[in-house]
Image (cartoon, grey):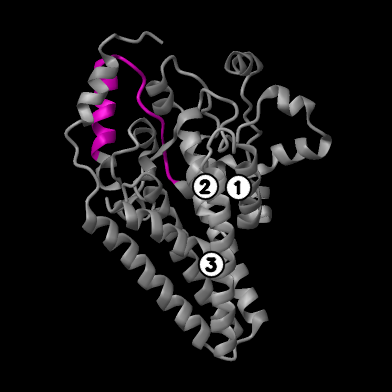
């Protein structure tokens, strides 16, 4: 790829005047989603029918999924701009679902530094050819069906286990991981004790609680893990410079405004990776400006796909896409 000396300066200049995170959009986003979640859970627990209980929990699961997606903005302190809120709020909404937000936040910073350039990236889903060839028959079967296995079988529980495992693995790269693991472990235990206390104080059924939790977990996993698989899969690789690598190893989506709002601007994932300080409200405009700069420098446009649902259905039935052995050897050096 022919890179002009002025390209990176032009890319930075194109988005330099965009405002930083503002309080109101972030608070409105989490406020509406929280109200929807609480309302759906209240209706679920006040219903006399198991069918109604399940259906209301499904709706609550979608609200919860988009609420958890908003915690991604908080990792970058672009949700509200209030650092204390962006640190505290995600943990309070994550711990009831056993999600270790603090561990995820540390790993996500590694992902932003290693995406496309370091095979140790904790969020890399695309296997290398060598990894696939050396894997057992069972693991090869998993690679061929990983979309369905991850989203429909392993689900949120599988992602929780994977996050804890990576937390232990990368402690040497992120010294704060030890403290975050202790904080998440304590927070999750306290959250579960409080929920159990609330349940028994109102003479609730533990088995009903467990069923409701599992419904939430399944729905959340369907949304969040599908998004995770779409963002980078099939695009992993080095593009000559760190900034271009972040732009070209991310998938973007042409979605309605409401979907973009629910996903926190992540349909414009390329510009988020190249400029993680840009708040979700400004990502569409940043995407437009970056596309114009790339066109000016006669570079390919950023990848834009149809939408989350259509792309998930299409890619979940495709053969696995592997990082080529030659590229993997270069990245490992």
Q: Which residue: 37% across, 56% down? A: 262
Give residue 96's mark.
Answer: 3
Q: Is residue 153 above or below residue 33?
A: above
Task: Check the picture and name the quadrant holding the N terminus.
Answer: top left
The residue singled out by tag 2 in the image is 104
Residue span colored magenta: 285-307
How many marks the image carries: the answer is 3
Q: Which residue is mark 1?
A: 163
Residue 121 image position (x, y, % from top left): 56, 32
Please state which of residues 19 and 141 is positioned toward the viewer in this rendering: 19
- Residue 200 appears anywhere in the view: yes
| Gap between marks 3 and 2 measured at Cα | 15 Å
Which of the pair 85/279 is nearer the observer?
85
What kind of element bears circle 1?
A: helix
Looking at the image, is mark 2 or mark 1 earlier in the sequence? 2
Callout 3–callout 2 Cβ contact below 8 Å: no
In the picture shown, does residue 3 fall above or below 51? above
| Up/down of 169 relative to 47, above or below | above
Q: Residue at x 54, y 45 (%)?
A: 312
Secondary structure under the numbered disc 2 in the rendered image:
helix
Q: Is residue 64 magenta?
A: no
Q: Quarter holding the C terminus?
A: top right
Q: Nearer the viewer, residue 138 or 105?
A: 105
Mark closest to the chain's N terminus, 3 or 2: 3
Assess whether mark 1 and mark 2 are in contact (beta carbons under 8 angstroms): yes
Q: What whole-number distance in Å separates the C-alpha atoms at marks 1 and 3?
A: 16 Å
């Amino acid at each position: 790829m022919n890179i002009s000396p002025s390209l990176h300066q032009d890319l930075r200049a194109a988005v330099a005047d965009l405002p930083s995170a503002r309080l109101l959009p972030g608070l409105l986003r989490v406020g509406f989603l929280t109200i929807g979640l609480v309302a759906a859970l209240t209706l679920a627990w006040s219903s006399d029918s198991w069918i109604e209980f399940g259906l209301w929990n499904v709706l609550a699961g979608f609200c919860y999924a988009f609420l958890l997606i908003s915690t991604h903005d908080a990792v970058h302190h672009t949700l509200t701009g209030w650092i204390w809120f962006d640190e505290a709020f995600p943990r309070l909404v994550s711990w009831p679902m056993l999600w270790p937000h603090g561990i995820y936040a540390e790993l996500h910073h590694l992902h932003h530094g290693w995406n496309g350039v370091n095979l140790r990236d904790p969020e890399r889903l695309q296997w290398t050819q060598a990894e696939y060839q050396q894997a057992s028959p069972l693991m090869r079967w998993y690679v061929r069906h990983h979309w369905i296995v991850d989203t429909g079988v392993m689900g949120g529980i599988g992602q929780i286990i994977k996050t804890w495992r990576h937390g232990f693995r990368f402690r040497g790269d992120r010294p704060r991981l030890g403290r975050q693991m202790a904080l998440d472990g304590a927070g999750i235990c306290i959250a579960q004790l409080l929920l159990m206390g609330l349940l028994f104080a109102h003479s609730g059924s533990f088995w009903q609680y467990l069923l409701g939790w599992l419904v939430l977990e399944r729905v959340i996993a369907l949304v969040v893990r599908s998004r995770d698989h779409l963002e980078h899969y099939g695009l992993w690789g080095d593009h000559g410079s760190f900034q271009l690598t972040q732009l070209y190893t991310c998938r973007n989506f042409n979605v309605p405004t409401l979907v973009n709002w629910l996903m926190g601007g992540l349909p414009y994932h390329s510009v988020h990776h190249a400029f993680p300080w840009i708040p979700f409200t400004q990502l569409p405009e940043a995407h437009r400006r970056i596309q114009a700069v790339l066109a000016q420098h006669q570079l390919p446009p950023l990848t834009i796909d149809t939408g989350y649902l259509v792309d998930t259905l299409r890619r979940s039935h495709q053969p696995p896409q592997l990082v080529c052995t030659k590229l993997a050897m270069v990245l490992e050096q």
